[in-house]
Image (cartoon, grey):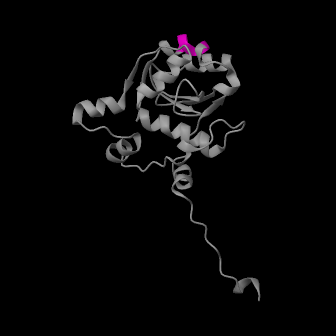
Amino acid sequence: TTISDIEPVYYEPTIAEQEIINNKVEYQYIIDIETAKNEIEGLQESVALDLETTGLDPISYQIRLLSLHDGNKTLIIDLFKTGSVHTLEQSLKQKKLVGHNSIFDMQFLKQAGVEVLMDCTMIGHHVLTGEQKSLKDLAKTYLEVEMSKEEQISDWGKDVLSDAQLQYAALDVVRTFE
């Protein structure tokens, strides 16, 4: 058998991998609290916010990532590295924040001692249509893009996050803003 006799094997990427390939988002990964404060203050007035947490209960679990996007810049702040989100409260309060399922995010923020007001795309859509839809559904309906949520259930508590996890967090907050 020669090399020319061997049939090539083609790898078919998963939906999550294909989304990363097609929609790779540039982001700034921040692990220093002073850098986080400065970068937040440099964002435009309207900012999308999304959290990645180690679980669903704000009493038992923690915020791992605070993701922000202002239409131009995407920040991924690793709170396991920077410390408490509470030190970012004043910077966040200077912004007009929007999220998807903001009640979830606000519960975690409040548990961490941060009280901010946020608009919510989920509630806004519900008020306008009577339907409660996921971010994935809204992205498909209004942006005509498919979103994978595979990384949503990944291990957000591990020491080092994968590029796929960071891309997922970045893409989620960008789609919320859009």
Q: Is residue 155 above or below residue 13?
A: above
| In-front residue for pair 167/130 | 130
- Residue at 67% over, 20% down: 83
Q: Quadrant of the C terminus?
A: top left
For residue 36, side relative to residue 140 (left or right) = right
Residue 34 in which image quadrant: top right
- Residue at 65% over, 35% down: 157
Please state the horizontal and vertical placement of residue 13, each as a whole percent of the image: 57, 60
Q: Is residue 162 visible?
A: yes
- Residue at 55% over, 49% down: 20
| In-front residue for pair 72/128 | 128
For residue 134, side relative to residue 81 (left or right) = left
Residue 138 in which image quadrant: top left
For residue 35, side relative to residue 115 (left or right) = right
Q: Which residues are magenta?
A: 87-91
Q: Main secondary structure of the magenta part?
A: helix
Please state the horizontal and vertical placement of residue 128, each as a whole percent of the image: 23, 32
| In-front residue for pair 133/92 | 133
| In-front residue for pair 79/146 | 79
Is 169 one of the magenta-colored residues?
Answer: no
Q: Which residue lies most toward the bottom here?
A: 1
Please state the horizontal and vertical placement of residue 52, each as a whole percent of the image: 55, 33
